[in-house]
Every structure is written in structure tokens, then in C-alpha cells.
Image: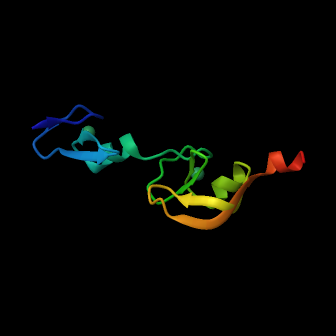
Amino acid sequence: MATCEVCGNHYDQSFELRLGGEAQVFDSFECAFYAVAPTCACCDNRIAEHGIEVAGLFFCCAHCMQHYGLVPEFNLRLSRTGEKVSMEVRNILDSSQL
Ligand SMILES: [Zn+2]
Ligand SMILES: [Zn+2]
């Protein structure tokens, strides 16, 4: 019997989720998702899919990334996979001042 870190429920089928070596206890995937899923920097949705990570920011999709002012060209990687894809990211605001 363990207590969920999100909702405080005591549940005999609670489980541990280990992220970066640190274990957290949850009673459901819903609570685990709420606790650990990154939030889109553009639309504030929790990201359930791979998403896109750019310079420490997470986006749920390419549309959100572009809406935020980033153009895909290089140095993008899929969040949580560490897998590099050949795209470049450039800030429209910065490049317009060149
Ligand atoms: Zn819970
Ligand atoms: Zn989004």
C-alpha cells in the first residue's frame, strides 16, 4: 500500500515511476501523466506524444513551435528519445534583426 504523490490516494496497486534515477509513486497513469508530462510552451497542453524539444522548451507539435516563433531547420531532437533529427531551429525575431 503506497500513497499517490499527486492525489494522495492510498492504493494497493500503486506503482513507482523512475525518471532520471528518481522514483515517484502514483496510483494511476493519469496521475503519473499529470506529474511528469512536459507542458507545451505555446498552448499549455500536456504532451503525451513524442513532442519537440528546443533549447529546453517543449512543444506538442511543429505548428506550436512555429507559432512560438521558431523555424525548423536544424538541432531539433525528439523529446525523451535523445534522437537527433536533421532540422535547424532559428528564431524569426532574432534573424529579422540581422
Ligand atoms: Zn493519484
Ligand atoms: Zn502546443
Residue 36 lies in quadrant: top left
Please tell me in which quadrant of the rendered image residue 32 appears: top left
Q: Classify the position of the N terminus by image quarter.
A: top left
Near-viewer residue (61 or 18)? 18
Q: Residue at x 62, y 46 (%)?
A: 42
Residue that lies at the very extreme toward the bottom in this rendered image: 86
Which residue corresponds to the image point at 14% horizontal and 36% vertical from the top-left?
2
- Relative placement, left or right, of 28 versus 86 is left
Q: Establish if 39 lies above or below 89.
A: above
Instruction: Using residue 15 as the reference point, say whether residue 96 is left or right of it.
Output: right
When asked about the image quadrant of residue 52, the answer is: bottom right
Of residue 18 and residue 67, the one placed in the foreground of this image is: 18
- Furthest toward the top, the residue is 8
Q: Position of residue 26 (x, y in %)?
A: 24, 41
Residue 51 versus residue 7 in the image, above or below = below
Residue placed at 23% from the left, 36% from the top?
A: 4
Instruction: Indicate the position of residue 14 as horizontal and vertical percent values.
Output: 17, 44
User: Residue 56 at what x, y percent from top left?
Assistant: 57, 44
Compared across the picture, whether 58 is left or right of 73 comes to left
